[in-house]
């Protein structure tokens, strides 16, 4: 089972700044099967990115995903007030088990 | 548009049972795997189970294996989760989601509380 470790636990930034969130996989399965979700309080998660770098339908191009071996990154440019939320990464596809990272909280500085 | 609506949550005593339902609309239900994902209060996301389009393939997290059963009825476009032998640690919001490996549509969740 692939374990995902997200960092930092909490990120404090101001609107207009750039956020860089990390998700490190414990091993490589040779795939890019990483998704990113955004969750605001009291709401269900929303898919942002799948396949490590493909934006989901309706997601602004301020959100982008990238990968380097076992390191996956979600970048949010020009932070908007509605972007302050909790972000989760997820691995899928290589085994029946599905794993999520523990989350990164993006808060207003 | 895709809509998923969960129901069936509530307060149940340890050792009790509960059946969750998820009503789907806006897409061809049988074309998609479906999944249950839960979130304990103040905690992160935990995958629980998934089922293939016609129900022939099912997988469970180790934490619920042998206690929970996932099923679906494509005629009524419904997904179910039968939860038996419930424990305090099963207390969580339970979300159903359309499963493409990643989860592109989610319901709003139904809250399950296991407490005496």
Image (cartoon, rainbow, N blue to C red):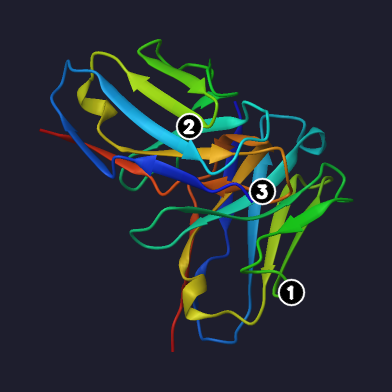
Q: Position of residue A44 (x, y in %)?
A: 44, 43
Q: Nearer the viewer, mark 3 or mark 1?
A: 1
Tell me the element at label 3.
Answer: strand
Q: Chain of mark 3?
A: B
CA gap, disc 3 and disc 2? 17 Å
Residue at point 70%, 44% (across, down): B34
Residue A36: image tag = 2
Do the dots labelled 3 and 2 sit on one chain?
Answer: no
Tell me the element at label 1.
Answer: loop
Left or right of B80? Residue B73 is right
Tell whether label 1 touches label 2 (CB within 8 Å).
no
CA gap, disc 2 and disc 1? 30 Å
Residue at point 53%, 66% (across, down): B9
Q: Quadrant of the C terminus of chain B?
A: bottom left
Left or right of B4? Residue B81 is right
Left or right of B25? Residue B51 is right
Comparing A13 with B52, the one in front is: A13
Q: Position of residue A102 (x, y in %)?
A: 41, 49
Q: Position of residue B57 (x, y in %)?
A: 85, 51
Q: Quadrant of the N terminus of chain B?
A: top right
Q: Chain of mark 2?
A: A
Per the image, the residue denoted by label 1 is B66
Q: Is residue B39 above or below residue B115?
A: above
Per the image, the residue denoted by label 3 is B35
């Amino acid at each position: 089972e692939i374990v995902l470790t997200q960092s930092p636990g909490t990120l404090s930034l101001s609107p207009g700044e750039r956020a860089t969130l990390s998700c490190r996989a414990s091993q490589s399965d040779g795939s890019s099967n990483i998704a990113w979700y955004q969750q605001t309080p009291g709401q269900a998660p929303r898919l942002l990115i799948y396949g490590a770098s493909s934006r989901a339908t309706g997601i602004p191009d301020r959100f982008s995903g990238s990968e380097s071996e076992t390191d996956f990154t979600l970048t949010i440019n020009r932070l908007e007030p509605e972007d302050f939320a909790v972000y989760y990464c997820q691995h899928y596809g290589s085994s029946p088990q599905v794993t999520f990272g523990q989350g990164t909280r993006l808060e207003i500085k | 548009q895709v809509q998923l609506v969960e129901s069936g949550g509530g307060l149940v005593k340890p050792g009790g049972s509960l059946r969750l339902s998820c009503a789907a609309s806006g897409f061809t239900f049988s074309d998609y795997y479906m999944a249950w994902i839960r979130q304990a209060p103040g905690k992160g996301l935990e995958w629980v189970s998934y089922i293939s389009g016609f129900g022939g393939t099912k997988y469970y997290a180790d934490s619920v294996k042998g206690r929970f059963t996932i099923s679906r009825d494509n005629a009524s476009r419904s997904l179910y989760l039968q939860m038996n032998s419930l424990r305090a640690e099963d207390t969580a919001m339970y979300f159903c989601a359309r499963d493409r490996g990643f989860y592109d549509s989610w319901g709003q969740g139904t809250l399950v509380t296991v407490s005496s």
